[in-house]
Each structure stands twice: as structure tokens, then as C-alpha cells.
Amino acid sequence: MMHKDRFSYLFKQYFQKKASPAERSEFMRMVHSAKYDQELEVLMDEYYENFQQQQSPFSAIEENRMLKAVLKAGNPTANVKLPAGRRMKLWARISIAATIALCMGTGFFTYRSYTYHKDQELAASMIRPGSNKARLVLSNGEVILLDTLKNGTQSLEAGIQLTKTKNGQLVYKISDQHSDRPSLIHTIETPKGGMYQLQLPDGTEVWLNAASSLKYSSVFKDKKREVTLSGEAYFEVAHRANQPFLVHTQDQVVEVLGTHFNISAYPDEEKQVTTLLQGSVKTSSKAAAVMLKPGQQSILNIKKEQLKLAEADIESVMAWKNGDFIFKDEDLASVMKKVERWYDVEVVFQDVDPSKIKLGGWVSRTKNISAVLKIIEPIAGIKIKIEGRRITVMK
């Protein structure tokens, strides 16, 4: 009984991302032993019990076959017995088992026509995950490639000092805060397959996701601190009671004094989403203006010109910054856009409507693209073909 209680504790710690390295290793050893398969099934049911139900495209028999295959990927000799009771959502049941199998360093599974051939494995192995890559464009047009910039401090235009720390962060400093230095406009841009962190002249911390850009002033002299964002970024704004911080996107403005929030505003997306973690923000568009409380998000539908409030899934929103992909009842179109940006690939759909396919799962963004595709392919019920950096999704 004591061992079962320990397994239950480690399970919850692991999937709430609270487990220490030692606890993670202990949990994986217990899973691999196959002694706790029954407890694992019960915990999987309990863990996802409150998730919103969705229609599975597979029969109960097919779902059980898939789950058996995933669990056996973690322990090929295990005798997996699945309860014949109520059906659980496809992605919830399978993705959690797939997470365990992947974390144990095993391969994945082959299910019916969802085969991952050796040539595909080789092609996938050539597509590495994104990393700290960005370029800084100064007001005079000079371009600095930040991933090749050496650590340390260097002087830029108009008395600006730029420091690149050991972990790759950029820190701005003005040599003389009281001088009449001109306020210059700088732009930091991340490519597909890149992300970056910087500290603005006012002390505000910004994390830029892939394929994003942030335009800002080298000196915040005006009554308002204003920046312009394209793409996705997480902000921890330095508090200045008499100088609000404004983030402009193509279709909205987010105003704060000092707070933590995430904005996703990619030009190729139909929605712009602002998620508040701490403090308060005001989101304004042509349609309306709303005030957010921690745990809420504003969703701007650009085509419909509608701005609404919703409860946020903070874990999913912040997954990119924390080094993960977390998909919860997300459509395939949205998932593959994230894959495109992080792995710098082109995704093409062939006889597939990605907006009608929902899926979920979790995998680290530090893994090669194969780890992500091996979760998506069987759960979404599609086939994936890799040719160079072109990913074709088909039935």
C-alpha cells in the first residue's frame, strides 16, 4: 500500500511539473517496472476526469489498441490490461501514456497505417528544435546578429550600452540618464526556429517567441512607455506609477503599469490573445475595451471585430516560455503553426481540414521534430511525410 501511495504522489508531482529530478527518475523507474500498470490506468482516469469531453474519431476497441501500443513502447514485456469500462477521451488517455514512453527514451509505436519508416526518421532527425537566435536592428540600420555576439558589454549609438549575459539575455543601459540623448528606435527580431530574452531600458523583461519582432525606444522619455509587437511575447513590466506601459499590435493596444502577461498576435492568425498572470491590464481594439484580472485572457477575433473575455489555461499559454509544447483540445491548424515556427518548416495539408481535428498532448520543445510528430500523427489520425523542411499532412 505504501508503494502505491508513493506512485500516486510521484504521478501527480510529475504531471503538475513539480517533481524534482530525483522524483522524476523514481517515477520513470516505477512505470518501467510494469508493477503499477493498474494504478497508472486509475490515475490517468482521475487526472483527466474534469477535462471537457470531445468526440473521438476512433472506436473503443481502436483506442484501447492504441493505448496498449503506447504503454508497451515504455515496457515491451509488460502485460497491459485495460479496463473495459467507460471510454476516456482519446487524446487524454493516449497522450499521457505517450509522454511517459517518450520520457523513458524509448521509441514510439506503430499503429495500423501510422508507420514511421526509417527514411522518415532520418529526415526528421535533420530538423533540429529552435534555439536562442535573434537580430537587433539599430535606428541607423546596422544589424547585430545576437546569437553570434560575444558575451560582455559593448557601446552602441547615442551612449547606449548593450550587455549580453552568459545565458544569452540582452540588457540595455544608458550611460547618462540625465542627458538630452535622442530617443532612438530599435527592433529585435526572432526568426522561425528562434527565441530571445531582453531587458528594456526601464528594466522590463521580455521573452520573444519564434517568428516575432519587438520595436521599442532606446530611452523612455515620454509620458508613456510604448512598444510594438508582432508575434508572441511574455512581459514582466517594471512598475512606474506615472508612466504606463503600452504594447501595440496590428489590431489592439494593451496598457499596463506593472504586471506579468503574455500576448500572442501573429499576423497569420485570426485571433490575438492577451493572457494576464499578475497585476491588471486593459486591452483595447476598435471593437471594445476590457479589463483583465489574473487568470483571464482577452481574445480578439480580427475578422469578426469581436473582443471577449475568457478564463485562461495558464499552463498551455506559458508552455513555450517554459520549454514545452502543451496542447489541450487544440485544433491541428493551430498546432502545426506552432510546429512551423519553432522548427522552421513549411507545413502543407493534403485532403485534410485541420480546423476540424482536435488533439492534445505534451512534449518538450528541446526535442527534435520527430518527437512531436510521433504524438500528433496517431492521435490526429493522419499521416505525415517529411521532404527536406516540407511537412505534408494527409489522410
Image (cartoon, rainbow, N blue to C red):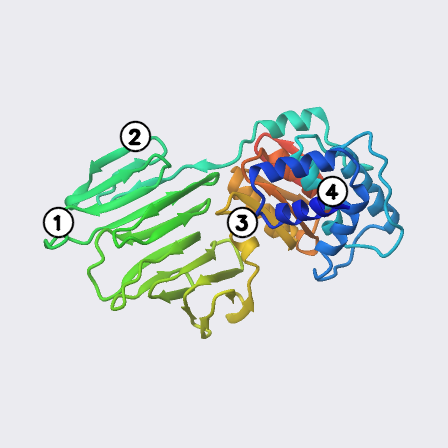
Distance (Cα) linking label 1 and label 4 = 63 Å
**Residue 245: image x %, image y %?**
32, 63
Q: Give the labeled residue for mark 4.
A: 3
In the rendered view, would you say 16 is above or below 156?
below
| Badge 1 vs badge 2, beta-carbon distance below 8 Å | no
Q: Give the labeled residue for mark 3.
A: 319
Residue at 30% of width from left, 62% of height from top? 239
- Relative placement, left or right, of 43 versus 309 is right
**Quarter of the image containing the C terminus?**
top right
The disc label shown at residue 290, or none: none
Q: Give the labeled residue for mark 2.
A: 150
Quarter residue 367 falls in: top right
**Lower sequence index among marks 4 and 3:** 4
Residue at 53% of width from left, 35% of height from top? 129
| Badge 4 vs badge 3, beta-carbon distance below 8 Å | no
In the rendered view, would you say 367 is above or below 352?
above
**Residue 110 visible:** no
Residue extending farthest to the front is: 2
Callout in the foreground (1, 4): 4
**Residue 29: image x %, image y %?**
69, 34
Distance (Cα) linking label 4 and label 3 = 31 Å
Residue at 72% of width from left, 51% of height from top? 92
Callout in the foreground (4, 3): 4
**Residue 157 visible:** yes
Quarter residue 270 falls in: bottom right
User: Which kind of residue does numbered mark 4 sit on?
Assistant: His
Is disc 4 placed on a helix, strand or loop? helix
Please state which of residues 21 and 139 is positioned toward the viewer in this rendering: 21
